[in-house]
Amino acid sequence: MPRKRAKKSYHHGDLRAALLDAAVALIAERGLAHLSLRECARRAGVSHAAPYRHFADKQALLDAIAADGFSRLTDVGLAAMQGLSQPRDRIDAYGVAYVRFAYEYPVHLRVMFTTELDDPSEATQIAGSRAFDLLVDSAATVVGRETALLAGFAFWSLTHGLSMLILDGRVPPEHTVDADAAEALARSVLAMWRGPLATAR
Amino acid sequence: MPRKRAKKSYHHGDLRAALLDAAVALIAERGLAHLSLRECARRAGVSHAAPYRHFADKQALLDAIAADGFSRLTDVGLAAMQGLSQPRDRIDAYGVAYVRFAYEYPVHLRVMFTTELDDPSEATQIAGSRAFDLLVDSAATVVGRETALLAGFAFWSLTHGLSMLILDGRVPPEHTVDADAAEALARSVLAMWRGPLATAR
DNA sequence: TGTACATCAGTGAACGCGCGTTCACTGATGTAC
DNA sequence: TGTACATCAGTGAACGCGCGTTCACTGATGTAC
């Protein structure tokens, strides 16, 4: 369905976005291994050669999903931290937002961290670094720059691990009935750990 | 190459194990999406129909890798905990062993937690539960049974997250030059967090 | 405002490929007597 | 120990399929004048 106009034209309007949506839906249904450009084209209501006007090849499609995911993650992280002045609060907020993002965009998160994407574009690598740097920078304001990297990794491990376990269905269903439940689980898990980054609770 | 004998017989000797090895190597090289039974057969030096004497289909091969991985993980976890009397030490040892396992068997870990495996066999599910229960049971001896599940999840998240980040190459290379370096990183990360499960350090 | 034209985003046929799976088969193995 | 025979683990041909990618093409779009 064209986004901007409903003309009789065979021009799609926003095929690129439609293909990305179709790809994400397809991966959600059948898994990364069964993603196919032809099926994406079919779902977007377009011939199987049309995607090549927007993506050089299949890898480029995956790359776009990853880049999109990283920039969304950075966005929700920044949004969650906004208005909080205490560094510890900011980091906690980022962690909770991370898990919520995982719950809401599971396919994106999986593609962001898949090794099926052979060589990510520079844009994707930069977007990925930004999401992580945001975390390390925040950690630095709490523990100091010299241990910030390690502290950032530790925090990243915790939130990333919880996110992956949720994605893989390893968490009892009652903790993931909806995004709010997942977020509550994230808060509990973060609270279990009283590290140098933890807020006094 | 036959394991037991070097006869002229066309019987392989241990084709099942050879196929599993080939599959793991193939996934390591090309990714899960490019795993193919025919290529595994080729690498095992056998006709493309032979694997069907050992695995019902491609999913069954994946399932076997996952089950194998879970049981290995449980084994290394138990081995690491053996001889340690302090519950906190035992849990820490399990976490370090987990990360080391991830470094040494990255393909197994990925298959264990992939959603490409549509419906794991009962054996695989049981093996998976055992690995996790080991963790929760240990946690229970420290924090008590009522919060053990949550504590177990938190600890699992941390070690699993760090493992996945290592697998995905998100950790600076100097921390993963070998298994010992990865293990040292695991110790540092675990040490960053002083939770109810943490050893007094 | 109208028109000529370059550009762009689609089409549909065609290519070659490797895959999963089935099937009838055959040669090797191991066991009962 | 020797032999007959059931079972087992391979073979190789064949099936149908969907895929990624290319190509010459055409109709729509937007812009310069």
Image (cartoon, coloured by chain):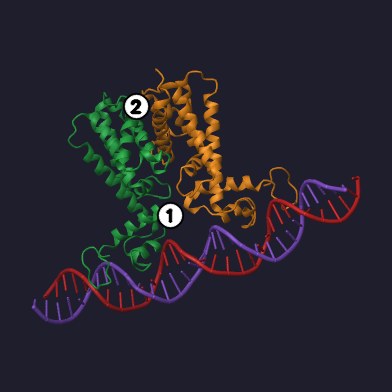
Chain colours: A green, B orange, C purple, D red
Q: Quadrant of the C terminus of chain A?
A: top left
* Distance CA(mark 2)–CA(mark 1): 36 Å
Give how far across and how far down residue A30 sits, in percent. Answer: 43, 54
Taking the image as drawn, is residue A50 in sight?
yes
Q: Are marks 2 and 1 on the same chain?
A: yes
Give how far across and how far down residue B73 sits, in percent. Answer: 52, 34
Q: Residue at x 56, y 45 (%)?
A: B64
The amino acid marked with disc number 1 is: Arg
Taking the image as drawn, is residue A137 in sight?
no
Q: Residue at x 71, y 42 (%)?
A: B4
Please give the chain letter of the residue carrying mark 1.
A
Q: Residue B83: give its label.
A: none
Above/below status of B71 relative to B64? above
Q: Quadrant of the N terminus of chain A?
A: bottom left
Picture quadrant of residue A136: top left
CB under 8 Å between discs 2 and 1: no
Give the residue number, with chain letter if any, for mark 2. A193
Above/below status of A13 relative to B182? below
Mark 2, Cα crowd under 10 Å, few <14 / some 14-19 / many 20+, is: many
Give how far across and how far down residue B134 sits, in percent. Answer: 50, 30
Give the residue number, with chain letter if any, for mark 1. A30
Tell which of A52 and B201 is nearer to you.
Answer: B201
Q: Is residue A105 left or right of residue B29?
A: left
Q: Secondary structure at mark 2?
A: loop
Picture quadrant of residue B38: bottom right
Mark 1, Cα crowd under 10 Å, few <14 / some 14-19 / many 20+, is: few
Please tell me which of labels 2 and 1 falls first in the chain: 1
Please give the chain letter of the residue carrying mark 2.
A
The amino acid marked with disc number 2 is: Trp
